[in-house]
Image (cartoon, coloured by chain):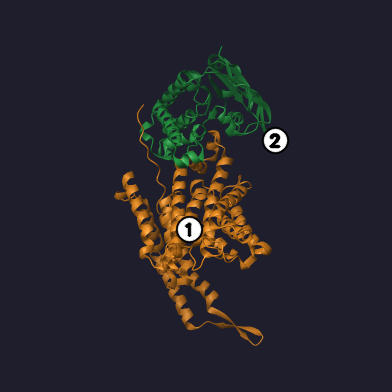
Chain colours: A green, B orange
Amino acid sequence: MADTLLVVRDLSMRFGGLLAVNGVSLTVDERQIVSVIGPNGAGKTTVFNCISGFYTPTEGEVVFQGKAMHKLPGHKIAREGMVRTFQNIRLFKEMTVLENLLVAQHMHAERNLLKGLLLTKNFRIKEQELVERAAFWLERVGLLDFANREAGTLAYGQQRRLEIARCMVTQPKLLMLDEPAAGLNPKETAELNALIRELCHQHQVSVLLIEHDMKLVMDISDQIVVINQGAPLATGTPEEIQRNPDVIKAYLGEE
Amino acid sequence: MQPSFMPAAIAAGVTFILGASVMGIRLQPAGISLEVTSAPTHVYLGLIAASLFVFILQYFRLTERFSRLLKSSQESKVELPAFLRTQQQQRLWTMLAIGALLLFPVIGSRGWIDLATLTLIYVMLGLGLNIVVGLAGLLDLGYVGFYAVGAYAYALLNTYFGFGFWEALPIAGALAALFGFLLGFPVLRLRGDYLAIVTLGFGEIIRILLNNWTEITGGPNGISQIPKPTLFGLEFNRRAAEDALGTFHEFFGIKYSPEYKVIFLYLLALILVLITVYVIRRLIRMPIGRAWEALREDEIACRSLGLNPTMIKLSAFTLGASFAGFAGAFFAARQGFINPESFTFIESAIILAIVVLGGMGSQLGVILAAVAMTILPELAREFNEYRMLLFGLIMVLMMIWRPQGLLPMKRPHMELKRG
């Protein structure tokens, strides 16, 4: 049994009178792929926003590598090694592909102003490291030829891959993908499937996934968490979920 | 496009009626009351001409044609000329340009050198504001406030504590940076219009404070007799002050000429600008510069990658303001006299116009725009009254034709090795 990486316990989020998330719990082990599924408006992205610190959950706790995260601001959570992508891609559109990856490595960069101004050797070595790591990931996601293109000019599928690469250069432990397959064609979805597996098995990251593409979810996930109307509905392996009568009811309606 | 008679006729009619009601009727004092009289005939002839002009414009849809013409020219991307493409060539041309600027005082007249010095101050201000507006994308309408802080820092330190220019320069920069930092805090959550209004207010607060704090700043009378910078203690006056090392012309054994002072100020400004250009050029290529741009593009994405937007914003305000502080101290030294009138909102607007005209984020663009914005009004001195009109017209045309500025920022190109 692998070590537990992320534990979310009884997470609730209330917006005024609306209880968007109600007592959701989930765990992610090291090198595990966990998917969160549910109908539109079920509160999946709200769960993501709570875990990644964009919202402060009303109740419940988020523990990552034994540290409580739910009180920390988003950027501190990201620094702990938990980074995310967005449902509506958020790249730095006017910057080049390479610059996107360099910005992402801000925390690994030599940020001493004086060293940078004087262009010391140490600074140059550090910058070169960043560029090399960026090149490594660009090659992994097949965007090396586009390194100097402005990110906003890339095709939709390429932008999705760039966003994943931008997360990976921060050297995370847990990658949170919010509907990475949205808008991709079947071929691109298959490539994404392979990429996520590679990240998990070769690069030792865990993946927490929100996705509507059931083929992808069932194929790739170790664990699936189903949310319906903000409340947890079921947790289990893909086989268990597919047979679960409650899940079938939520998705297809009652007979 | 079909010429259309009715809309054009209506537009012309509206023009005439509006014009006639505003200009065609006059109020004349008759005793203690006012009398309505008709304007002289030439006013009406003018109105008819204006209506005809509107009619023709509308009938042939000239405005639409014009804007389409502008649109089509906008599509074409302006590339750097061929001789500026490679890095070595760029370096060579930069060296040549610096050399020419150094030699400029030899050929330029005193008036021109003085104007060039003023231009250099605006270059510095433009480059500094470019950090805040062009790179970090934070619209700052109160930048002149930091300029004022720098200028008054030197003036006051000199008046009350006898500081010289060189001691006061870093303090002025640091003080302006501190003000930038302090302004940064309340506006952290603001963006766009709201930020613009708060910064505008900040600039005005500083000016009004300086205007009313008469006991210390001298109020509207300002501060005079601010000494000029010295060259390693050598003064450029005819006779040295009592505690000074001596004068420049005595030390080098040459005849006194007031031109030395002007040339020295020009060269000093040039050095300050060169330092500014270098520092900002480096900053853009450093993690902090990339973070500024990323913040402009998407704050939420920044946070998701572990960048702290608060620190990035504050650093942009702080560093941007410090350059205004240096420029301010130099301005005070050059003028020898400052009062709050020099730091009105119109100055902020001009600096912002320089940044926007030049192309957000682009250093060369900002430098060219600063030169254009200070030299053109000088050349068009005869049309003094129409200067602001011309200024507005240029801005409007630029926004239609080249919203991205004269020389938009060029993205750095890097070669990657295949791993």
Visible residue check, residue B91: yes
Q: Which residue is mark 2?
A: A17
Which label is found at residue B19?
A: none
How many residues crowd mark 2 within 10 Å: few (<14), some (14–19), many (20+)? Answer: few
Q: In percent of the image, x 60 and y 65: which residue is there? A: B223
Identify residue type, mark 2: Gly
| Residue B84 to residue B298: above or below | below
User: Relative to B90, is A22 on the left or the right?
Assistant: right
Which label is found at residue B231?
A: 1
Query: In the rendered image, which quarter contains the C terminus of chain B?
Result: top left
Q: Are marks 2 and 1 on the same chain?
A: no
User: Relative to A79, is B104 on the left or the right?
Assistant: left
| Residue A45 image offset from top left, x and y in percent | 58, 30
Residue B336: image quadrant is bottom right
How many residues crowd mark 1 within 10 Å: few (<14), some (14–19), many (20+)? Answer: few
Q: Secondary structure at mark 1?
A: loop
